[in-house]
Amino acid sequence: MDQHSFLFQAMIYLAAAVVFVPIARRLGLGSVLGYLFAGIIIGPAVLGFLGDGGADIMHVAEFGVVMMLFIIGLELEPQLLWKLRTSILGLGELQVLVSAAFIGAIAMALGLAWQPALAIGMTLSLSSTAMVLQTMQEKGLMKTVAGQSSFSVLLFQDIAVIPMLAILPFLATGTSGVSSSDHSPTLVSGQPAWAQTLIVVTSVIFVIFLGRYIMRHVFRIIAQTRIRELFTASALLLIVGIAVLMTQVGLSPALGTFLAGVVLANSEYKHALESDIEPFKGLLLGLFFISVGASIDFNLIASQPIMILSIVAAMMVIKALVLALVGKLFKLAFDQNMLFALALSQAGEFAFVLFSFTLQEGILPAALVSTLIAVVAISMALTPLLLLVHERFIQPYIGTKETESSRSADTVNERNPVIIAGFGRFGNVTGRFLQANGIGTTVLDIDSERVDLLRKFGFKVYYGDATRPDLLAAAGANEAKLLIITLSDPAKVLEMVETVKKYFPNLRVLARAYDRGDTYQLMDEGMLHIYRETLDTSLRMGVDAMSLLGHRKYHAQRAARTFLKHDERALKKLAAVRGDQKEYINVAREVIEELETFIQSDRQNAKLQLDEGWDGDSLIAESKSSFQGNDAKL
């Protein structure tokens, strides 16, 4: 049998994954280690199914990293990216600069010139986005302080690849013996510096323009065909196309697709893109990890084990110390800081690209690049083991408390006309009101501690992620009359609305909104029953304020109802022009003037003066004394 045929190679990869990943998971080692072991076993060091190093497969497998960055970009709306700016720029920038300086200085102390030393320092300062994020997601650590800090640093590192690729050509010394003609030409090959910069900037602007102004219309047309595989093909085409473009202009494909993901994060097709790309991403990431395992050159390691392992140990210790120092400056708790430092102490997948680039530009000799590639692969393979050691032997003693729940969803064994998603401060009131009126509700909540606490109070609450269509189906979404979404995260509310429209189109939805922005998005999704969480309470407070100031109770209540009715009408007007800031402000001014005119006109209605049965002066006096009593207690 031809071992180099595509089908044979595919069979080997799939078989290795199917055999080793479940074993690793059963042993509590995580899927990443399973993939790595699979790569080592089927690689040239043991069975030799993949040929020398599996280098060709690595190029395909790196596409998993590209897809992962695209999905990460989809999760990061520009507003969220702005909120994370302090940790991204602060933590990330400081870690990269200090790590690069330390590693570069040591390389110079070992006899290298400053140019190759700087190239090595910059490259090894980067960590593995694929390895760290995948491992942290599996361990449920992404929402911890350490997880979010790690994500910020990794994001900055991914962005930092651009200036690094721009700097490396200036470090060329021509010592490698490898000419640029050995590599495929790109659009920037042989161009003067200003032309290279112009091409790169134009490409980045094109990606933003493509995502913001073109792809939405393309996806809308594709979606109208109702052929799902066509939509999937379009999503893959977008990613592959951007990856090709970025490669042609000498930029990182992962960074290009990350940018496209961020631009599309606000689009109505965000969740559809995520669900369509996710299976490909997972499979290709597994392929990437297998390739890393297969690429470890055990012959090279065996020939100079002490030197290579010493470099690995020195690099990981230096990076961990720098990360711990940076984490300390940003006031990370000790347990979180330790996890943060250990998780990012390895070199990253971009090192394969950057070291290849340094070889192409003549910055580093081929022998040194081979050694450093082995260092990178070993450090990546050690990361899951390091986190396992931390989890088993260090964490229990230093007490990491911030972990996501790994608890499985409860089994729902009842059917009710109403399903409530989220039983926090908002859903709790709605749920108790319905239950007090004898209306059956099935309550789902993702907060395990809250579920346990509510059960002690006698509430029947099921633990589980209500955004999952399978859990909604298990809760009876096909038979229920209403779904009340009271989740506190607006993005989750929107995601759930889209899920319900897709899987349970006949279910009527009542959705909670945080503010006008969320309301507009829910209106775009066709929601008719939207409830801004503070609107009614604010109006009730206004009614009480008017009463305490001596206004008649009936007038205050009527004014509140008028305000609410007018505000909901105005909401539709404003939603239609929210894309034009100037027009939005003009319309907002108009509706505010209309409201004031309408309420003033209503107050002057002579007939309303007769309606004094709602309250009297004595009730106002009683209300005032009640508030004064409360103030005195406070």
Image: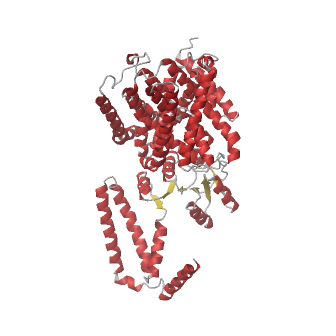
**Which residue is rendered at x = 36% and y = 23% of the image?**
186
Horizontal side of residue 368 vs 223, given as left or right? right
Task: Give the quarter of the image for residue 551.
Answer: bottom left
Residue 234 at x, y percent in the picture: 42, 33
Give the image's coloring scheme: secondary structure
Residue 545 at x, y percent in the picture: 46, 77
Residue 300 at x, y percent in the picture: 59, 18
Q: Is residue 5 above or below residue 422?
A: above
On-image quarter of the C terminus: bottom right
| 488 or 336, nearer to the observer | 336
Q: Is residue 37 above or below residue 476?
A: above
Q: Is residue 460 above or below residue 105?
A: below
Horizontal side of residue 125 vs 464, given as left or right? left
| 182 or 326, nearer to the observer | 326
Residue 273 in sight in this render: no
Outermost residue, bottom side: 618
Q: Is residue 542 above or below residue 532?
A: below
On-image quarter of the N terminus: top right
Horizontal side of residue 189 vs 386, given as left or right? left
Residue 299 in sight in this render: yes
| 164 or 175, nearer to the observer | 175
Residue 80 at x, y percent in the picture: 45, 49
**Which residue is rendered at x = 58% and y = 30% of the image?**
379
**Which residue is rendered at x = 61% and y = 26% of the image?**
309
